[in-house]
Every structure is written in C-alpha cells, then in structure tokens.
C-alpha cells in the first residue's frame, strides 16, 4: 500500500492534479522521504489542492491531515518554500528527483 500511495503522489500531476496557485506556480506538490530507524521511510506528501498525508513504509500513516487549519497552513508554507528554492536547484537534481524509497530524497 505504501508504494502505491507514494507512486500516486509522484504521478499526481499526470493523474490530473489541478494547476498550482500563483504563489507557487511551479510547485504542484512536495514529496519528502524521511529515513527511519531500521531501514524504513516516512513519506510526507503536500499537494497544491491541500492534500497532506504521511505514509509509513512499515504500514499506517495519516491521510487527509490537510483538513486541519494548522496542517493546511504548513502545507502551503512548504510549497511556497519549495517554489523559492527552485532557482537554486540544478538541472541534474531536477532529473534525479524521483527515487525509490530505498534511496531517501526530496521531490519538488
């Protein structure tokens, strides 16, 4: 289930995610893989339509947390920070943005 949810997040634009708002017009979403003890991952998802979720590779997680005002605000701030960071990313890092969970990465 984890792999399918993570893959759906990485493919969200292709699957019909609406265009992002003007304040982060180049960032439709952010996917962050965070290594956990024991070799697993926690994957944070923040999408432009407000979806905010945390998936655990060991099972479980939180889906739909963006409905809470503080989480929704953090989602927007993360996407705006990603937008501001884009100019400092190289072309090679943009191409290498999608990794399997065995290789931790951040995707902007």
Image (cartoon, helix red, strand yellow):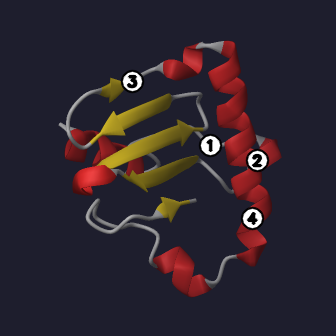
Q: Is residue 17 visible?
A: no
- Which residue is disc 2 drawn over? 80
User: In the image, is residue 18 above or below residue 28?
Assistant: above
Q: Position of 101 compared to 107: left or right?
A: left
Q: Is residue 14 left or right of residue 1?
A: right
- Seen at 39% across and 24% down, the residue is 62
As measured in the structure, the alpha-carbon distance from the residue carrying label 2 to the one carrying label 3 is 22 Å
Mark 4 — residue? 85
| Disc 1 target residue | 19
* Residue at position x 80%, y 59% in the image: 84
The residues bearing labels 3 and 1 have C-alpha atoms spaced at a distance of 24 Å
Residue 81, horizontal then vertical, whole percent: 75, 52
Q: Which is nearer the eye, 103 or 5?
A: 103
Q: Nearer the viewer, mark 2 or mark 3?
A: 3
Q: Which residue is mark 3?
A: 62
19 is higher (above) or lower (below) than 33: above
């Amino acid at each position: 289930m984890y792999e399918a949810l993570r893959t759906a997040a990485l493919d969200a634009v292709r699957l019909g995610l609406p265009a992002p708002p003007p304040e982060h017009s180049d960032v439709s979403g952010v996917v962050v893989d965070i290594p956990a003890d024991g070799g697993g991952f926690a994957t944070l998802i923040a999408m432009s339509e407000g979806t905010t979720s945390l998936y655990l590779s060991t099972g479980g997680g939180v889906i739909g947390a963006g409905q809470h005002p503080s989480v929704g605000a953090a989602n927007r701030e993360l996407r705006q920070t990603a937008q501001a960071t884009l100019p400092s990313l190289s072309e090679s890092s943009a191409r290498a943005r999608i990794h399997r969970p065995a290789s931790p990465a951040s995707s902007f």
